Image (tube, rainbow, N blue to C red):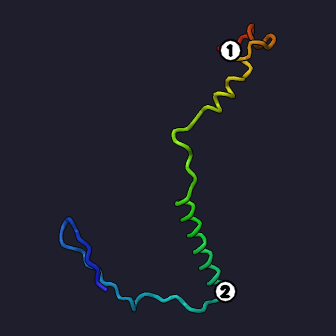
C-alpha cells in the first residue's frame, strides 16, 4: 500500500506499507499474554472514557452558598455578647 502526503515545504512525502511485514496477533496465546492484552484494552477504554465523559463544573461558578455561610459568621451577629457582637473588636 502506498500513501502520499502533501508537503507544503517541498515535494510530497510517499510512504509504502507492506501489509505482509506487519506482525500478526496470535490466535491462541498463553493466559499471561491474554491477561496482559485484556489489561491494556481495559486501561485504554478507562482512559478514553475518563477523557471523553468527565464531569464539568458549572461556568461561571456560583458563590451564593458561600455568601450565605459568610453572612452567618459570628462577626456579623450583633446580638452576641462581648468580646464578639456589637462591642467586639477584631484584629485589623
63 displayed left or right of 4: right
Q: How many marks?
A: 2
69 displayed left or right of 45: right
- Residue 88 position within the rendered picture, expressed as x and y whole percent measured from the top left: 74, 10
Q: Up-down: is 53 above or below 67?
A: below
Q: Up-down: is 74 above or below 47?
A: above
Residue reaching furthest right?
81
Please name the residue that numbered disc 1 is placed on: 91
Cα distance between the residues tagged 2 and 1? 69 Å
Residue reaching furthest top?
87
In this rendered view, identify the residue nearer to me: 65 or 7.
65
Residue 61 location, quadrant: top right
Instruction: Write the residue at 74% across / 16% down.
Output: 77
- Residue 1 position within the rendered picture, expressed as x and y whole percent measured from the top left: 31, 86
- On residue 31, the disc is 2
Instruction: Write the residue at 74% across / 12% down.
Output: 78
7 displayed left or right of 68: left
- Residue 27 position within the rendered picture, expressed as x and y whole percent measured from the top left: 56, 92
Amino acid at each position: 500500500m502506498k500513501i502520499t502526503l502533501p508537503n507544503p515545504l517541498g515535494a510530497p512525502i510517499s510512504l509504502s506499507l507492506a501489509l505482509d511485514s506487519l506482525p500478526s496477533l496470535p490466535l491462541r496465546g498463553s493466559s499471561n499474554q491474554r491477561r496482559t492484552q485484556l489489561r491494556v484494552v481495559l486501561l485504554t477504554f478507562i482512559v478514553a472514557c475518563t477523557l471523553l465523559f468527565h464531569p464539568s463544573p458549572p461556568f461561571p461558578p456560583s458563590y451564593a452558598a458561600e455568601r450565605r455561610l459568610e453572612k452567618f459568621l459570628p462577626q456579623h451577629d450583633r446580638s452576641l455578647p462581648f468580646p464578639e457582637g456589637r462591642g467586639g473588636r477584631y484584629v485589623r
